[in-house]
Image (cartoon, rainbow, N blue to C red):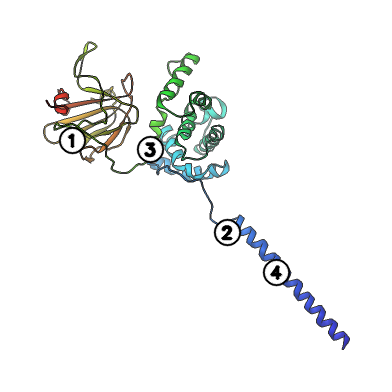
Amino acid sequence: MRALKWKIYLAAAMAGMIVCLLVVVFQILMLLASVFGGSEETTTPSNLPPAKVSEAVLQYQPIFEEAMKEYGVSEAYLPLLLAMCMQESGGQGNDVMQSSESKSGQIGTITTPRESIFQGVKYFASLVKSAKLSGPDNEDRLKIVVQAYNFGGGFIGYADSHGGRYTQPLAQGFSQLMAIKMGWSGYGDPLYIEHVWRYLQTSKEGTTDVSGGGDFKIPVMNPIITSGFGPRWGTSHRGIDFGQPVGTPIGASQAGTVEYASFGKPGSGFGGFGNVVLINHHNGYWTLYGHMSVLRTTVGQKVKVGQIIGEVGSTGDSTGPHLHMEIRKEKMGGHVNPYPYLYPS
């Protein structure tokens, strides 16, 4: 009888130990699940819109994601990195992120797109850390980082010594300073931010306030005419210039159809205008808008009065940020003075 009791006690004790062991194992499994996938991954909130890039760039998205994970870069920066790739190469060639110099100080040392992307993301991560960028929602610091990708990390210190906020004149100043220091005619791309941001999608259709009592509306807010129509510098100025800060939205002066929207190359009939848009208003008139920093329309698009078609810049043959506007009676000629059309007496 005594032996039977001992067997019962022993069985109960073993059962208790097994239960305790199962509880411990369960807790360990729950802990591992929470660490390795049992909960959703948290990411830095992003105010960046999707990237509008080519298929040639999009094919590398998995490599970007792999590299970002490798170097601890938040996935919130993915649209921006794709846009940078679009600006750097359009996804063409081996060094798609143009990152050879950040790796070796020399051009042409990277031989595969994968190597280029990993090096570019690694360099971007170092700039984020150097600039103490908390996330993509801090646009001023973000633009400093992106411009530094083009200029080099020294731009971060330069920006910090000049107020710590990105401005286009700040980038121009650093470019000129470094060009003098290096003895070069130019240094980097002082419009790199404008060139990258054009590949970040905004709303499909935006409008800006256009004003004036004429049949053609004034395409920018708070217009300041800096150069009129007529003789200028020994030539004929065939439009009027509105001095405006870089990034000022440009609205269509009338409704119409976009017939040209590109960088005006020599021989195209639009050489010297930089990023330029030509709109046919289907009433015997065309309007032209030149020197934009960013194009926000495409050929064939139907636009309304005030619809945003681009942003003020200083591309092409330009001495400073402004909008050059023309009104024509022919697609490639027939220039008339825009002033009486915009400011009727």
* Disc 3 crowd, CA 10 A, few/some/many (<14, 14-19, 20+): many
Q: What element carries label 3?
A: loop
* Disc 4 crowd, CA 10 A, few/some/many (<14, 14-19, 20+): few
Q: Position of residue 324 (x, y in %)?
A: 25, 24
Viewer-closest of 210 and 200? 210
Q: How far apart are marks 3 and 1 (CA)?
A: 26 Å
Q: Is mark 2 on a helix, strand or loop?
A: loop
Q: Where is residue 157 in the image (x, y as percent from the top left)?
A: 53, 25
Residue type marked 3: Tyr
Q: Would residue 235 be seen by someone viewing this image from the given angle? A: yes
**Residue to which mark 1 is pinned:** 254
**Residue to which mark 2 is pinned:** 38
Instruction: Specify whether 104 is left or right of 234.
Output: right
**Residue to which mark 4 is pinned:** 22
Q: Where on the picture, by quarter, is residue 232?
A: top left
* Disc 1 crowd, CA 10 A, few/some/many (<14, 14-19, 20+): many
